[in-house]
Image: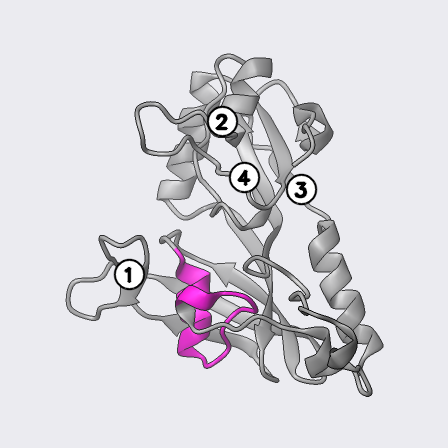
Amino acid sequence: MKPINFKDLMIFENDNYLIINKPPHISTLDDRTPDAKGLSIIRMAKKVYPDAQIAHRLDKETSGALAIAKNPEAYRNLAIQFEKRQVEKIYHAITTGIHDFEGVMVDLPIQPLPIGIVKIDRSNGKDATTIFTTKEVFKQNTLIECMPLTGRMHQIRIHLTCLNAPIVSDIQYGGKMLYLSEIKRGFNLKKYTEEQPLISRVALHAYTLAFKDLNEEVISATALYPKDINALLNQLRNNL
């Protein structure tokens, strides 16, 4: 991975907050080991803003809008909004299968497991709600807008699986890798020694984020798709 200039990731900044377009394959926080030295968003942010704190997180593979507080008061303000479910979050996911969702709500409790994934557990799980709306339909895949009303680990991913719409490349929750030979008519796989998947990570992107600043003004930012999501969507659109 080539070096990343943290300031190049910024899509919004004021005295209290900055919002970045997080690249995939980078952890939001440091790994949970005492000697962790891998790249993380919080470590990059603190090099520029020593008081930076993150009130929410994106999975390592997930790209998109991530808010960072620049001072303790701003952090408390945003953390309270997340706790009260006042932050608006919209994600885009590319899923397997053709789905016609119009404000479909999934309200299923989620229980984390020790192995780093989650399961639906109606007895012991914590409440989790997500609303899904179809944005674009392709030959055998669908671009879906996802609005989580809660913020549980892997919430969107497992809720889509419950709708029989697992995210492309999300192996942990029933998704499959997608190959050009599966969507392109006349594609000759014999020409290739080993075909690579069209995207190498979970096809999930945090598209927009909105919350209130300390003065009650609304902060809203949209994170454009990264190259891998754009490339996948172009292939799906070109092979309808």
Quadrant of the image occupied by residue 76: top left
Which one is in front in this view, the residue at disc 3 or the one at disc 2?
Answer: 2
Which one is in front in this view, the residue at disc 4 or the one at disc 1?
Answer: 4
**Alpha-carbon neighbours of circle 4 within 10 Å: few (<14), some, or many (≥20)?**
some
Q: Specify which label sits upstream in the sequence, 4 or 1.
A: 4
Whole-number angstrom distance, CA of label 3 to CA of label 2: 19 Å
Whole-number angstrom distance, CA of label 1 to CA of label 2: 28 Å
Q: Nearer the viewer, residue 181 or 175?
A: 181
23 is higher (above) or lower (below) than 135: above
**Does 25 sit left or right of 113 as displayed?**
right
In what quadrant of the picture does the N terminus appear? Answer: top right
199 is higher (above) or lower (below) than 175: above
In what quadrant of the picture does the C terminus appear? Answer: bottom right
Task: Report the residue at 57% width, 69% height from top.
Answer: 168
Q: Secondary structure at mark 3?
A: strand
Q: Are marks 1 and 3 in contact (CB under 8 Å)?
A: no
Q: Nearer the viewer, residue 12 or 187?
A: 187
**Alpha-carbon neighbours of circle 2 within 10 Å: few (<14), some, or many (≥20)?**
some
Mark 2: which amino acid? Answer: Ile
Q: Specify which label sits upstream in the sequence, 3 or 4.
A: 4
